[in-house]
Amino acid sequence: MSVYLDHAATTPLRECALEAWTRAQRDLAATPGNPAALHFGGRRARRMLDDAREQVAAALGADIHEVIFTSGATESDALGVMAAARGMHGRDDARDLIVVSGLEHDAVAHQREVASREGFSWEVLPVDAGGVSILPRVSGDDAPASWDGRLALGSMTLVSSEIGTIQPVADFAELVQASGGLVHSDAAQAIPTLDVSFAELGLDLMSVGGHKVGAPAGIGVLLARRGIPMTTDRPGGGHERSIRSGTPDVAGACALGAALAEVVAERAAFASRAAALRAHLLSHLPEGTYSTVGETASSSAIIHLSLPTARPEAVLMAFDMDGIAVSAGSACHAGVTRPSEIVMAMGRSEEQALGVLRVSLGHETTRDDIDAFLAALPVAIRAGAALDGVAHVRNERNEEP
């Protein structure tokens, strides 16, 4: 028996999404057509795409014209941040500043190199000990003085993909917009448990990935408010409001629409069940293991643990041998043993930032899955501690004259 507790990395394909994808592929095979074509096949494909766009918009609290299909949240993040920043800079060349939280996914954080090459300044907000972004202190509705007239775009994740904490996106949006900038949020990890509405959050741009909600990998969405300036780096045939050119994945869009509709319909029940599973897990942890974020408001589906070992590779291997899939951090860091930059930003030591574990729940997770994890955890910790001891002996030998 295998136990899958890595839903924050990717979650299993929902049956409704598979059915929508299969149905769309069969329809396209029977009546082929590019959605941009004017003939009957193209018109049929366009109707399918528009139906999916409407379904996505309804699930995310957006207008149908705000939905831009992409290959996933990573592309949506990169495209949203830089296209909007370029658009603002093109409108007013004094706007050369991008501000992001210290908890961003690499898809946002690594845009720093691109931004620097293009002449933008980059500011990272600090993180408190509980894993929440610290907003600048300002009076009333004023914007930070250093942002005023310069800020092109601010980006803050809604839920940290690594530690699961919920971020003050609405407050951040007010500060950014008070300075005249645009605001973007990566909502990929928030959709399953939080009531996410693009309109109510007051955002200009928002990113969502399909495989985080039970759709196939390779499809995602960038929501972009109409009228905002955007200068894309991927011009082509004018698809998706000329922001993301390329023939759209019609079947993928249909699958994403179906998955999002089901996630929204089940959200309240899943969030409640996940909270109960999370509480059960946290109340049965062995000595020396604890929640990294303490009592900080977090997604009920992401549990970030601090372990009494600095050898996450040994811990993960032990879990894998027991048929349990968990993560030491973001999936984009898989295979690389290095301290978590986010945990270090919270004020922890390098050793503490190595000894972390992310357990993430999905709609198929059961109490038996959590109990299996809890039963395997002490063995996994001992495996890590054993490797700690080997490393300590080697270090002592290297220090001898």
Image: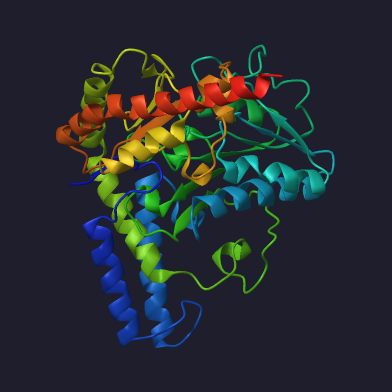
Query: Which of the colour schemes (rainbow, by chain, secondary structure, one colour) is used?
Result: rainbow
**Is 182 situated left or right of 67 in this image?**
right
| Residue at the image position 21 percent from the left and 28 percent from the top | 375
Query: Could you say which quadrant of the image residue 321 lies in?
Result: top left
**Is 227 situated left or right of 170 in this image?**
right
Image coordinates for residue 65, horizontal then vertical, percent: 49, 57
> Residue most toward the front?
401
**Quarter that holds the C terminus:** top right
Image coordinates for residue 267, horizontal then vertical, percent: 26, 38
Q: Is residue 284 visible?
A: yes
Q: Is residue 343 visible?
A: no
Residue closest to the eye, 194 or 230: 194
Residue 221, relative to residue 191: is it above or below? below
| Residue at the image position 24 percent from the left and 27 percent from the top | 374
| Residue at the image position 38 percent from the left and 14 percent from the top | 295
> Residue most toward the left?
368
Residue closest to the eye, 5 or 319: 319
| Residue at the image position 38 percent from the left and 58 percent from the top | 54
Residue closest to the eye, 401 or 81: 401
Image coordinates for residue 332, horizontal then vertical, percent: 51, 46
**Is 106 situated left or right of 252 in this image?**
right
Residue 247, relative to residue 79: is it above or below? below
Image coordinates for residue 106, horizontal then vertical, percent: 58, 42
Query: Could you say which quadrant of the image residue 4 lies in?
Result: top left
Q: How many marks?
A: 0
**Is 337 situated left or right of 263 in this image?**
right
